[in-house]
Amino acid sequence: MFFHFILLVVSLMGSLRSFHVSGCNENCADKPAFTPTRLVVKHGDPTSAICSVCQHACLVNGTTTDLEKAVGDTLRNGTTILWTVDRLTEWHTSPICYYSNAAYQCCSSLNVTVYQPPDSVSFSFVNHTGPMLEGHQYTLQCTVQDVAPVENLSVTFYRGQTALGQLQSNNTEKKPVTEIFSLNITPSKEDDGVQFWCEAKLELGPDGPQRPPVVTSENITATVHYKPQLKSSSSDLITVTEGNSLQLNCSAVGNPRPSYTWTSPIRSYSNGSVLTIDSVTSADKGQYTCSVSNHVGTATVKFDVDVKESYIGLIVGVIAAVALLVVICVVIGYLLFYKPNRMGQYNLNDDFCSQTNHSAVPSVE
């Protein structure tokens, strides 16, 4: 019987306390004040707050004051109550400081945020492994393990050091949860070899840690396959003189590395990004087509080549003919004019000399 009486008293006390808490006015003029006004506590850390219950209302006879809490201890000093917790492990706690008299009840609750940084953060591509294709859509996924409160969590996706987007959860659960965030991307060839990753940050406001808890994922280096893209295109007519060399370049970039095929209505050529003809002839005139391809696609470029006739041989021939004609003229002139005249002079001299030699020379006695 006595035991039942004790249970009834405890139950009534609990009901009265609930009555005080649920029926109090938080908008009264002389309401209790907590210092600090908000607590941000890491799970498992100690914490404390002071409640100044009232200034003047407590002077009314019959006024009761108290601090209702789920955990911790209280120490009263006049109208001030100190609340302390050695190790806060409750995820849902909000101490209520109040006073009550015959006229009314007044109270204030302390906002307590208990947080836990993520245990780990992982990054992946959803339902995909291996190379990506340019222009196709893929989903990035960032998984944050055991974080609280998740509503204060922001997740940022990165391409290298460039932020792609920031996401937040609408989950209001106060206990640690695992949350998955997703972001769609459409990669281009510029994304080939780029590292993708994500970052999870707890934004706890000015009352939280000065450096918000941040956990980053591992990096994943993307491989993007894309069709060949020509470094330059040719649409102008290419003119080359016979005998000169010709080079046609259709270099391209692509992943996987592309292959080259040259075609011409005249002849076939070896494969490569550059086609070279050491000595052009008139037969090399025409249109050349270069096809660059890999398994993603093909790029094509056409070169129109015109071959000009070379006049060097003709000029050399003319010069040679003129030189030969000059030589012939010199020889003929020599034979017809110079040589006969030269021979005639020699005969006269000989005759003159002969007559001179046979003249009588008077003797000297």
Image (cartoon, rainbow, N blue to C red):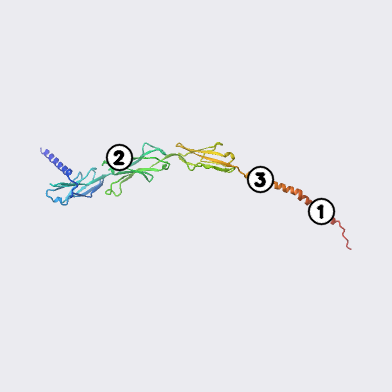
**Mark 2 or mark 3, earlier in chain:** 2
Amino acid residing under circle 3 = Val
Pointer 1 local density, CA inside 10 Å: few below 14, some 14–19, many at least 20: few
Tell whether 237 sits left or right of 1: right
Q: Residue furthest bottom?
A: 365
The Cα–Cα distance between marks 2 and 1, rounded to whole angstroms, is: 133 Å
Q: Nearer the viewer, mark 2 or mark 1?
A: 1
195 left or right of 13 in image: right
Q: Residues within 10 Å of mark 2 (few under 14, many from 20)?
A: some
Q: Which mark is residue 348?
A: 1
Q: Which mark is residue 68?
A: none
Q: Is residue 88 left or right of residue 362?
A: left
The amino acid pointed to by label 2 is Thr
Local secondary structure at mark 3: helix
Disc nearer the start of the sequence (2/1): 2
Of tags 2 and 3, which is closer to the observer?
3
Among numbered discs 1 and 3, the one appearing first in the sequence: 3
Q: Nearer the viewer, residue 121 or 157?
A: 157
Give the image location of residue 213, x and y in percent.
Answer: 30, 46
Identify the residue position indicated by label 3 in the image.
Answer: 318
Q: At numbered mark 1, what does the secondary structure look like: helix, strand or loop?
A: helix
x, y (%) of residue 326? Answer: 70, 48
Residue at the extreme right:
365
User: Residue at position x 76%, y 50% from top?
Assistant: 337
* Element type at mark 2: strand
**Could you tell me how far apart the alpha carbons at marks 1 and 3 are, in whole angstroms?**
44 Å
The image quadrant where one finds the N terminus is top left
Q: Which residue is mark 2?
A: 178
Mark 2 and 1 residues: CB-CB less than 8 Å, in contact?
A: no
Q: CA distance from mark 2 to mark 3?
A: 93 Å
